[in-house]
Amino acid sequence: MSDLTGLTLKAALDGLAAKRFSSEEITRAHLGAIEGSRALNAFVVETPDKAVEMARASDARRARGEAGPLDGAPLGIKDLFCTEGVESTAGSMILRGFKPTYESTVTSHLWRDGAVMLGKLNMDEFAMGSSNETSAWGPVINPWRSAGGNAALTPGGSSGGSASAVAAELCLGATATDTGGSIRQPAAFTGTVGVKPTYGRCSRWGIVAFASSLDQAGPMARSVEDTAILLTSMAGHDPKDSTSIDAGVPDFASFCGKSVKGLRVGIPKEYRVDGMPPEIDALWEQGIAWLKDAGCEIVEVSLPHTKYALPAYYIVAPAEASSNLARYDGMRYGLRVDGANLTETYEQTRAQGFGAEVKRRILIGTYVLSAGYYDAYYLKALKVRRRIADDFDQAWLTCDALLTPTAPSAAFALGDKSDDPVAMYLNDIFTVTVNLAGLPGMSVPAGLDAQGLPLGLQLIGRNLDEGTLFSLGSALEKAADFRAKPAKWW
């Protein structure tokens, strides 16, 4: 029943409710798909025994009439989420062998609602990267290939394993995290839907921290409605997370398919950057036309501090990372490399445990927080961040949401930018402003480039107004009618 892996999450849940197949059947179909797709390197830990056990428990609940909203649905979990008794490494050698004794809040919500865990998904080390090449377990391969080419492409990062697994039909949906675009950019690169909710909408408790004021969990799936279903389960107030927002969680799926007539959609003029490929610009214009046809009013808006967003982000994020990663010292968990004394043990553990990109960001962060530079860099970056948030507040006076491209290009070949960190950082140019302002964002697949690779459009919304994004996203999805799938080569 391999066709079970081709279902959307919604179709699978409907099929399970109608008893056309069992959770064990659909779970085993996905486990078979994962086994046959290891060339993609999407999973770092497979949990087949646990998955079958959870699926059987789900079938038993359904037989008793006690099925939850996600009962029986097989999902993949990004390796940044701590999962009780299952190795959780954040893509880093320094956490090799770490099996948490607790469950992250987001994953516990998914299990509460009946979901099944297939395993842990590969990612850039500590979520630091835009191409999934910094993982200690090797790069993830994008299931898409350029027309007539066979070069291995990046699935984007840091949630590359989540994006690749969803696009290759290895799971019905996946958890992911977004610090500067790590849900939306991989979604654009793989023809999937990714949602970064409002900061604080999903609990960060039990998620390995990168930059605490920017990190946010969200879903990736193959349709806008699927991400809405997942976010409804993932979200919710958590007293264990001091940044968690105490706000009710609506049924996000109810917003999908709602009329968008009369909504005002802003087009930020600063996002028309020099050197943007004509295909990206053409897709953006197409997206504007689709929303106009759906009844939206298009207005031009200005976000004047956009040009400072990337440098501000690459000061704030590494500064927080250098603080968060100080806890990895070989003393309590993960890798330990013994030295002649305590200092040498710290040094050798970190030297062998952290990869090059993580070390680079720790050094940048430590530098900008150091005496003499704190005011010049870190405090200035925080002021810029406030201005960026103010820009959005001004924009909301004239519009309900914004439409932009998700990424400045389609997926590029692995190795293309790995020796140029700045070129890699520029991948986040359209996404980091959303994290700096704490706003919700969504990437929707909207077309293919000349090489047959997926391109995405990004929607940005007001704080806690994910509902409007789901309405607009489903309107874009309907107009784009994106049905392309990667041709199987793996």
Image (spheres, rainbow, N blue to C red):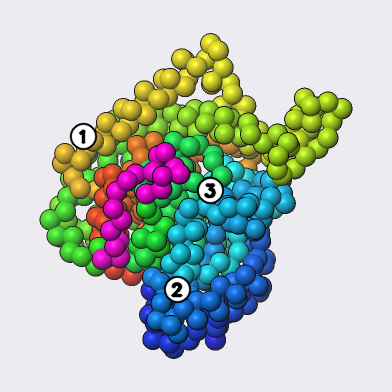
Q: Which mark is residue 472?
A: none
Q: Position of residue 422 (x, y in %)?
A: 54, 35
Report if the CB atoms under discs 2 and 1 are less than 8 Å apart. Answer: no
Q: Quadrant of the C terminus?
A: bottom right
Q: Secondary structure at mark 2?
A: loop
- Residue that badge 1 annotates: 394
| C-alpha span from label 3 to label 1 | 35 Å
Residue farthest along the top direction in this orientation: 372
Kind of residue sitting beneath label 3:
Gly
Kind of residue sitting beneath label 1:
Gln
Q: Crowdedness of circle 2 by 10 Å Cα count: few (<14), some, many (20+)?
A: many
Q: Earlier in the sequence, mark 3 or mark 2?
A: 2
| C-alpha span from label 3 to label 2 | 23 Å
Q: Which residues are magenta?
A: 237-254
Q: Residue at x 46, y 78 (%)?
A: 61
- Residue that badge 2 annotates: 71
Residue toward you, 15 or 308 = 15
Q: Position of residue 32 (x, y in %)?
A: 63, 77
| C-alpha span from label 2 to label 1 | 42 Å
Q: Position of residue 237 (x, y in %)?
A: 37, 49
Residue toward you, 444 or 75 = 75
Residue 117, picture quadrant? bottom right
> In this figure, what is the number of numbered marks?
3
**Residue 246 is one of the magenta-drawn residues:** yes
Q: Which mark is residue 206?
A: 3
| In the depicted structure, whether residue 355 falls above or below residue 58 | above
Q: Earlier in the sequence, mark 3 or mark 1?
A: 3
